[in-house]
Image (spheres, rainbow, N blue to C red):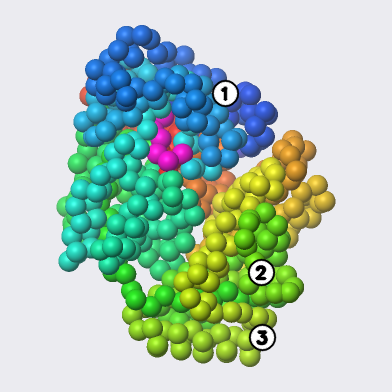
Amino acid sequence: MEKWRAADRLLKFSSRFASAVNWNNSCKSKQGKYFYSVATTVHRNPLFSSISPDDISYFKTILGERGVVQDALALDAANTDWMGKYRGSSKLLLQPKNTEEVSQILKYCNSRCLAVVPQGGNTGLVGGSVPVFDEVIINVGLMRNILSFDKVSGVLVCEAGCILENLISFLDDEGFIMPLDLGAKGSCQIGGNVSTNAGGLRLLRYGSLHGSVLGLEAVLANGTVLDMLGTLRKDNTGYDLKHLFIGSEGSLGIVTKVSILTPPKLSSVNIAFLACEDYTSCQKLLLEAKKKLGGILSAFEFLDSDAMSLVLKHLDGVRNPLPPSIHNFYILIETTGSNETFDKENLEAFLLHSVESGLVANGVLAQDINQASSFWHIREGLPEALMKAGAVYKYDLSLPLEKMYDLVEEMRVQIGPAAKVVAYGHLGDGNLHLNISAPAYDDNILAKIEPFVYEWTSKNRGSISAEHGLGLMKAAKIHYSKSPETVRLMIDFDYCVFELLPDTSCLDDNHSIICLCLSA
């Protein structure tokens, strides 16, 4: 029961970061309409004010007419998450162009007790990037300048609104790569990536953003600008506070600038698309890849037969790389190195050994960039294919490798014929994307999924959020991954931070560290 009490406190307590959240929630009372998680009724915090004409006038003095958006069509898009499951009712979207404007907005909102929700590219999947009620939306998309790039150190400094794909293109021209790559790279923004500690396709090689981000700038609830925008790889002077903001989902402040270490672009990239007949072979193949491919292994992705069938049916132009049949499991392997001949020979030798040992049933090595892109399109196109297939319940989980597919098989028994269970993910770092695909959202299906999926994950010492964050969907579920003592420390830390801030006036003694995300 103690775990439930800790979670209940997270739901009921209002945020000490008033200007970053209107958060006492797991979901709105109208949640059943959206079918996104087991219902928990929430109410708008009465401490927060409503927008007035004077507020609008003030924001226009800061941002100008174009930076204060009240257009119904634009607001509808900003109020609605990418999957169309979560919808707020904000009447105001603010678009600051620099850190000073963000600071002025938050300082004013704090003095007026106006709740806000930070927003980036609004590509999040857990309902953290849109309002719960009528929060002011602060979208950092106009803050998209690349401030500096050092070719010697590989350190890139940029504003939070830079779209990930634009950074990838910029670095490609400079002979470097981003250590982060996502399927949503065409829309997601680096500030949101950092605030949600996005994982993505290159984590196996380059690690998480906790390792790549060297510094950041953030604006706190009262408008204080926190300058931690260092570019040094070594700095042992006290607490490394930037790590508190990486993955904090906007709960401590709005990230406005980022410095990130980028590796040089290597000349040799090879992609293999393989078929395995059982999950045990997939695990053994990963172990062999780590041994035989060593430092050049950069990605190890998997998808099951249901995922492949879904892509072939719903994505235009996709062909089966290993016709004519559908295999039980597929593995995409990428290697990145500096010697094309050696790397290719190494990968070919690995593949030959894997086939001869029975780990791989079939496979193909990409012969050119077009074929390589087509292989990646299968893996990266899965979220789109699921959306086209109908309703989808998405779960982003970290699990011990040997247990990962057990959950998929048990979920199929749990669900029965009412829906299809589709599995794919980053096998190289133990991240399962579990999807339950159905013709339409249905409370009966949801009741079979939850809390079963969270209980199973907790029992096997997994995490209910590998890389998507908690957001609105999972805030009440934090106890499945964190102990009551850990949650209590989060709350206490949150309380201490905001007690130390001057001029945080519209707050009571109730608070929560879990807030709406600054979405990627």
What's the residue type where badge 2 is placed? Asn
**Quick check: can you spot residue 510?**
no
- Do the residues bearing badges 3 and 1 touch, measured as CB atoms within 8 Å? no
Q: Which mark is residue 358?
A: 3
**Secondary structure type for disc 1:** loop
In the image, 340: left or right of 420?
left
Residue shown at the point (68%, 61%) measured from the top left: 312
Whichever of labels 1 and 2 marks the residue nearer the N terminus, that label is 1
Q: Residues under labels 3 and 1: Cα distance?
A: 54 Å
Q: Which mark is residue 320?
A: 2
Q: Is residue 360 shown above or below 515?
A: below
Q: Residues under labels 1 and 2: Cα distance?
A: 46 Å
Farthest residue, direction top: 53
Q: Using the image as rendered, state which of residue 391 and residue 240 is in the foreground.
A: 391
Residue shown at the point (73%, 70%) measured from the top left: 326
- Do the residues bearing badges 1 and 2 touch, measured as CB atoms within 8 Å? no
**Secondary structure type for disc 3:** loop
What's the residue type where badge 3 is placed? Gly
